[in-house]
Amino acid sequence: MANKGTNGIERVVLVSGAASGIGAAVCRRIAGPDTALVMHTRKNREALEAVAAEARQAGTETELVLGDLGETGTAAGLVTAALARFGRLDQIVSNAGMADSRPIGEVDAETLRRSMAAMPEAFFEMATAALEPLRASPWGRVVAISSFIVHVFGVIGTSFAATAAAKAGVESLAKNLALQLAPDGVSVNCVAPGFTRKDATGHSALVGEFWDRAAAANPMGRIALPADTAAAVDFLLSRDAQYITGQVIHVDGGLTLL
């Protein structure tokens, strides 16, 4: 059983990219009086405030942090913000990222560099800063959001070369972290969503007919909802998932079967 603080909080959870999509869905799903949320977005404060208001209605204390994870120091700053506000950090959902559907030959080197900085480098920095708080937690969990594009190539004629490379780096780092923290009882896993419907406030790398083609190409015949992935994240953060670590859970409607 996790230790409760003086205000009844059992866990403090950091969610990056929480203003829309999967990050927002995770916050909505895990919100409750026993949970405090440190919620991050790069710059979409209005949308983040709206999600935070929903979480507070469910009884959750929130701390909001803005910053570009592609800039050195921002990811570690999220951990610092959690410790400054709540004195602890128990769980991390590393969700923030960027998507670019261009193949090699069209995508530029700067996009690759930005993708690596915003995803695996930021995850590395966040994990490094959080090592001791996670080890000290009785309910330590890390979930990194990856993508099907690390495992399936060329679906509907897109390659996501830079994004796939960056997400593959996140998966590799997560597995290394899982092995490192296993003796401390801290689990580290990845969730790899398929094509996922975007919120009105979220950015999409695909437009128009691509979404119809993506749905038609999926064995289940539809695009994922952010809530589909949030449900898997919720389970991996739970006490019931304490013996699952170092895994990549695919929430893709069967895309990886193709």
Image: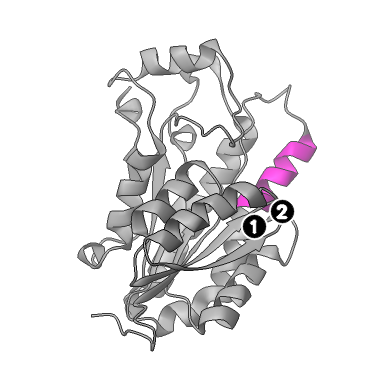
Stretch in magenta: 109-119
The prevailing secondary structure element of the residues shown in magenta is: helix
* Image height of 200 relative to 2, above or below: above
Instruction: Please state if 200 lies on the left or on the right of 254 as rendered.
Output: right
Q: Position of residue 117 (x, y in %)?
A: 69, 52
Circle 1: residue type: Glu
Q: Are marks 2 and 1 in contact (CB under 8 Å)?
A: yes
Residue 83 location in percent, x, y? 56, 80
User: Crowding at label 2, few (<14), some or many (≥20) Cα neighbours within 10 Å?
Assistant: many
Q: Where is residue 161, by image quadrant?
A: top right
**Lower sequence index among marks 2 and 1:** 2
In this view, 86 is above or below 55: below
Q: Is residue 62 visible?
A: yes
The residue where tag 2 is placed is 70
Residue in view at x 45 percent, y 13 percent:
212
Q: Residue furthest bottom?
A: 6
Query: Relative to 6, is 146 on the left or the right?
Result: right
The answer to whether residue 242 is left or right of residue 86 is left
Query: Marks 2/1: CA distance?
Result: 8 Å
Q: Give the quadrant of residue 207.
A: top right
In the foreground, 206 or 242: 206
Tell me the mark number nearer the camera, choosing from 2 and 1: 2
For the image, the number of numbered tags is: 2
Q: What residue sits 54% from the left and 50% below the top?
A: 50
List x then y, in percent, for residue 236.
31, 58
In the picture as drawn, the residue positioned furthest to the front comes out as: 57
x and y percentages locating residue 146 in the rendered image: 47, 45
Residue 217's place in the image compared with 12, above or below, is above
Which mark is drawn over residue 121?
1
Amino acid type assigned to the residue bearing label 2 in the image: Gly
